[in-house]
């Protein structure tokens, strides 16, 4: 949003006229449209007072700067020494590396855009100085899992945000981080990383933040990274154990159902062997055991019939005798 804002300022007709009119030895605020240009700078700065410290325009011929907060540079000010001067050299909008503002002591960065005349000649630059305090507050709210966090780094590896405030503004080369992460950041390569921070293994993804040149690196501890996998393994083990238990119960039940009629047949056969024909055998299964049970039952019935016949014959014979 800030780069778009300064690009709009760069084509503002009043600002272009002021920079075109100001020549070496001139005072920028004496230009015809200087007051209107200042109003435009104030207006753009007031659109985001929480983050924008000031909006400004700088003339290349006179090496002078005018800011929306009323600051006007003196003769000792040098445009070529500014961090945003590269936008004049390249002709492109840039975001600077973060730096400490000398007047406020806050960490800021500048969004700057070159201003051209109709012929395409560079007249100077316009820009905005942006405080990183609010961005730090926002970044602090982002969490990954329970204890993971994200890091924001500039193109040259300077930490713009880190949960440890004393690391902010340090370069990645000056912290205890593994070489693979350092090389990935400095090369600006999007990739997944397993890396070391203070000897502890971290996992994360390195991504470029749009076309700003900044980099976002996520940081998740080793234990938390594998926590989901461990939970899945435990869940699978529990499911497996429950499955084995259910299978064992089913086998036991099936075995009991299978052996019960066999035991009943054995008991009946023993009673028949002992001469007890008043046995009752009830087997309802429709398999070989059921067929065997029916055969037993038919055999008992026939034996009873034979015995009744023999008893009747014996009675008749006794009467004849």
Image (tube, helix red, strand yellow):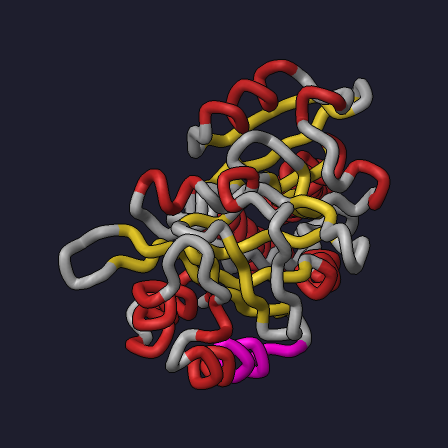
The x, y position of residue 290, in whole percent, is 47, 50
What is the residue that sits farthest to the left in this orientation? 119
In percent of the image, x 49 and y 56: which residue is there?
A: 111
Residue nearest the observer in this picture, 309 or 264: 264
The x, y position of residue 49, in whole percent, is 65, 78
Asked if residue 197 lies left or right of residue 277, the reply is right
Residue 48 colored in magenta in the image = yes
Q: Is residue 234 above or below residue 71?
A: above
Residue nearest the observer in this picture, 76 or 284: 76
In percent of the image, x 32 and y 56: which residue is there?
A: 123
In percent of the image, x 46 and y 43: which residue is there?
A: 85
The quadrant in which residue 263 appears is top right
The quadrant in which residue 137 appears is bottom right
The x, y position of residue 200, in whole percent, is 78, 23
Asked if residue 212 lies left or right of residue 281, the reply is left
In the picture, the quarter occupied by the C terminus is bottom right
In the picture, the quarter occupied by the N terminus is bottom left
Residue nearest the observer in this picture, 93 or 213: 93
What is the residue that sits farthest to the front in this orientation? 25
Observer able to see residue 241: no
Residue 91 colored in magenta in the image = no
The x, y position of residue 187, in whole percent, is 46, 24
Asked if residue 312 lies left or right of residue 209, the reply is right
Asked if residue 34 lies left or right of residue 230, the reply is left
Q: Main secondary structure of the magenta part?
A: helix
In percent of the image, x 47 and y 67: which residue is there?
A: 28
What is the residue that sits farthest to the top in this orientation? 179
- Look at the image and give the residue range highlighted in magenta: 41-49
């Amino acid at each position: 949003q800030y780069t778009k804002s300064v690009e709009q300022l760069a084509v503002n007709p009043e600002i272009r006229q002021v920079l075109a009119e100001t020549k070496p030895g001139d005072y920028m605020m004496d230009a015809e449209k200087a007051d209107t240009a200042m109003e435009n700078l104030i207006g753009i700065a007031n659109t985001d007072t929480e983050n924008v410290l000031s909006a400004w325009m700088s003339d290349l011929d006179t090496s002078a700067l005018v800011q929306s907060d009323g600051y006007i540079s003196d003769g000792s000010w040098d445009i070529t020494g500014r961090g945003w001067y590269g936008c004049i050299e390249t002709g492109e909008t840039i975001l600077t590396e973060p730096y400490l503002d000398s007047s406020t002591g806050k960490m800021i960065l500048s969004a700057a855009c070159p201003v051209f005349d109709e012929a395409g000649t560079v007249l100077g630059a316009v820009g905005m100085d942006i405080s990183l305090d609010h961005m730090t507050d926002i970044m602090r709210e982002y969490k990954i899992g329970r204890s993971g966090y994200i890091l924001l780094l500039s193109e040259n590896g300077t930490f713009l945000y880190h949960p440890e405030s004393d690391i902010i503004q340090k370069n990645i080369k000056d912290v205890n981080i593994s070489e693979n992460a350092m090389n990935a950041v400095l090369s600006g390569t999007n990739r997944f990383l397993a890396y070391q921070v203070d000897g502890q293994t971290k996992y994360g993804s390195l991504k470029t933040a749009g076309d700003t040149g900044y980099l976002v690196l996520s940081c998740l501890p080793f234990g938390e990274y594998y926590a989901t996998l461990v939970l899945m393994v435990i869940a699978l083990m529990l499911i497996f154990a429950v499955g084995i238990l259910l299978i064992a119960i089913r086998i036991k039940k099936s075995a009991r159902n299978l052996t019960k009629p066999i035991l009943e047949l054995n008991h009946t056969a023993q009673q028949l062997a002992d001469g007890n024909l008043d046995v009752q055998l009830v087997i309802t299964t429709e398999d070989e055991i059921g067929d065997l049970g029916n055969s037993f039952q038919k055999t008992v019935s026939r034996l009873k019939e034979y015995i009744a016949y023999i008893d009747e014959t014996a009675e008749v014979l006794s009467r004849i005798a």
